[in-house]
Image: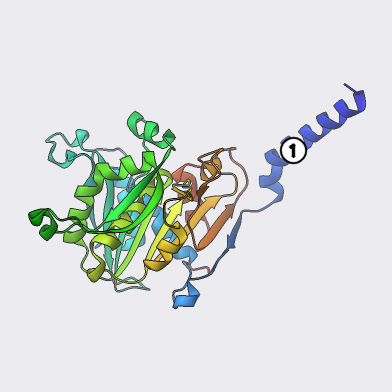
Amino acid sequence: MNKYLLYFLIRLSLTITLRLQFSGWVNPRVCRFIHSRNIYLQHGVSNPTTDDIRRYVVASQFAYFNKEDPSFECSLNDLKKNYGEEVVYTPFFKDGTEKETDVKRQIIAGYFIQANDLKRHSTETVVAFRGTKRMHLDEWKNNMDSIPVLRHFIKDSDEGKETGKKHPVCFSLWVHRGITKEYDRCRIDFLKKMKQVYKGGELVFVGHSKGIVSQLGALDFVVQFTPNRCFPIHMISFGSYKVFADLPGGDNPREIFKKMGLYCSRVNFLRDPVVNYPFFRSYYRHVFDTGVYLKQPPNSLLEHSIFNYKRFFMDIPPYTQP
C-alpha cells in the first residue's frame, strides 16, 4: 500500500476517534427537533412538546417493571412526579399469566396509565407497551424474526361468534412477523382491559424499542371500538425499529394510519442503530408524521437504552417548545 495513502487513513481514523471522544467537551448537549411532515396542524392538533415527550418516556420506562422488580418503586416515583400523585396504573399481561399465583411468573406486556387535572388535558390515558427485557429469550427471537406476514384486521363481535359469520376485512397490512407474535400474546388481555379502563378523553400509545407493538394495539383498538374512540389518537415511539412493509397485496400503512386518525411521532438518537432495523430489507418503512431526532455528546456508540432517552429528557429544561 502506498505510504501516503496509509498515512492519510491513519490521520483520518485518529481524527474521527478524537472527535467522538472529545465532542462532549466542545459541543454542548443539543436537542434538535425536525418535523418532517407536519400534518398535525392540518387537523388542528399541535405537535408534542418537550414536556409531553418527557412524560411519555417516563411511562415507557415504567412499562418495563412489575411490583417484584427492584426498580419498580423508583420508576413509580418518577411516574407520580410527572403525572401527579393520583395517577392510576393498570397492567395487562401476556399469555394469560395474570392468573399466576407467583407474581414473579407474571409477564407484564404494559400498563394503562391514567391521570387527571393535567395542565393540558383534564383526562389522559397513556397505553405503554413494554420493550424487550434482557432475560426474555423468546422476545429476542421474535425481534429477529423479520419476515413480513400479511395481517388482516377484522372487527370482532358477539353476534359474529354466535352466528358463525365473519365480518369483512377492514384492511390488511404487511407486518414484521415477530412483532405480530408479540402482540398476539397479549391481545386478549389488552382489549379486555382497554374496554374496562378507557372511558374517553385523550388517548396516547407509547413504547420503546419492541414497544412499537403499540402501533398494532392502536390499529386493533380503532377497528374494535370505532364508535367509542376519541379522535385523534397519538402514538409516540422511542428508538423503535420498522415493522410495516410496503409490499404488493397489502394496503399502504401511511394511508391507513391517516384514514383511522392515528398520528405517529418517532423519537430517536441520531446514533441509535436499532431504528434502521430490519437491516437489508428495503421494503420496510417507518410510519410517522413527525420526527424528533436527538443529538448529545457520545457516552457510547449505542444510545438505544430507555435509560438514555429518559436521562436526556430529564436533564433538559421543562416547558420548551420544539
Quadrant of image for the N terminus: top right
Q: Residues within 10 Å of mark 1 (few under 14, many from 20)?
A: few
> Could you tell me residue 247's position as x and y percent?
48, 49
Quadrant of image for the C terminus: bottom right
> Could you tell me residue 207's position as x and y percent?
39, 51
Q: In the image, is residue 297 above or below residue 11? A: below
- Between residues 74 and 180, which one lies in front from this camera angle? 180
Left or right of residue 144, residue 26 in this image: right
Could you tell me the amino acid type at mark 1?
Ile
Q: In the image, is residue 22 above or below residue 77? A: above
Note whether residue 71 is visible.
Answer: no
Q: Residue at x 39, y 67 (%)?
A: 259
> Could you tell me residue 98's position as x and y percent?
16, 42
Q: Secondary structure at mark 1?
A: helix
- Between residues 275 and 55, which one lies in front from this camera angle? 275
- Locate residue 57: give its quadrant: bottom left
